Image (tube, grey):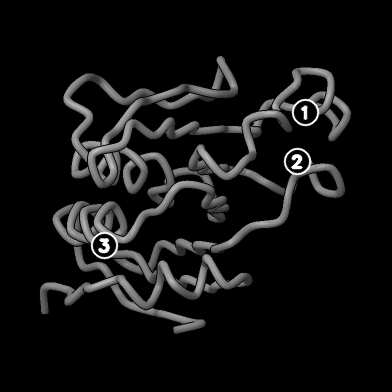
Amino acid sequence: MQHFTTHLHDEAGTIALGASLARALAPGLTIYLHGDLGAGKTALTRALLHAAGHTGHVKSPTYTLVEPYTIALQDRAVEVLHFDLYRMISADDFLDAGFREYFNSNNICIVEWPEKADGVLPAADIDVFLTVTGTGRDVELSAHSDQGYQCLDRLKFAPNL
């Protein structure tokens, strides 16, 4: 599958989508999260991480720029790096911080505000667009690589209607 869209009626829908994404993850994925402030980027990531087995607190990396988490995928420890680039002044900040080294076949990188590092950020396997509509959210997922297509093919999600 190359493209997936749905409407999330409430927070439970966001949690369910995060859980579905967690079951579809594979090492090496790069996922970009797009949406205005308050669109649910961190909430979706938090739901994904908890569903993937992380039991601790998941905080927004707004000030730290990146928060690392270790999860188990197919009995293998995998590092998930949650980036929030909102406070970066230029794309050079991304390079200066040494963040490119985290993007490899062993880690999963989830990036909020990827446009802040446009031109230096590795390409996304999946783009997730979140748009607030009324009390819910419209969500669009687009795959851009074989690994992204495979992830979306594994995605099993039925929204609460």
Q: Secondary structure at mark 2?
A: helix
Q: Mark 3 and mark 2: span between their CA atoms?
A: 28 Å
Name the foreground residue: 128 vs 27. 27
3 vs 2, front mark: 2
Q: CA distance from mark 3 to mark 1?
A: 34 Å
Q: Quadrant of the N terminus?
A: bottom left
Name the residue at 30% across, 71% down.
Answer: 155
What residue did someone put label 2 on? 116
Quadrant placement of the C terminus: bottom left
Q: Residue at position x 49%, y 75% from top?
A: 149
Circle 1 residue: 94
What's the distance in space between the residues labelled 2 and 1, CA to CA? 9 Å
Observer-nearest of 50 and 137? 50
Amino acid type of the residue tagged 2 in the rendering: Lys
**Label 3 neighbour load within 10 Å: few <14, some 14-19, many 20+:** few
Q: Disc 3 designates what residue?
A: 135
The earlier-in-sequence mark between 3 and 1 is 1
| Kind of residue at badge 3 | Thr
Residue depicted at x 19% and y 35%: 53
Say whether disc 3 or disc 2 marks the residue closer to the N-terminus.
2
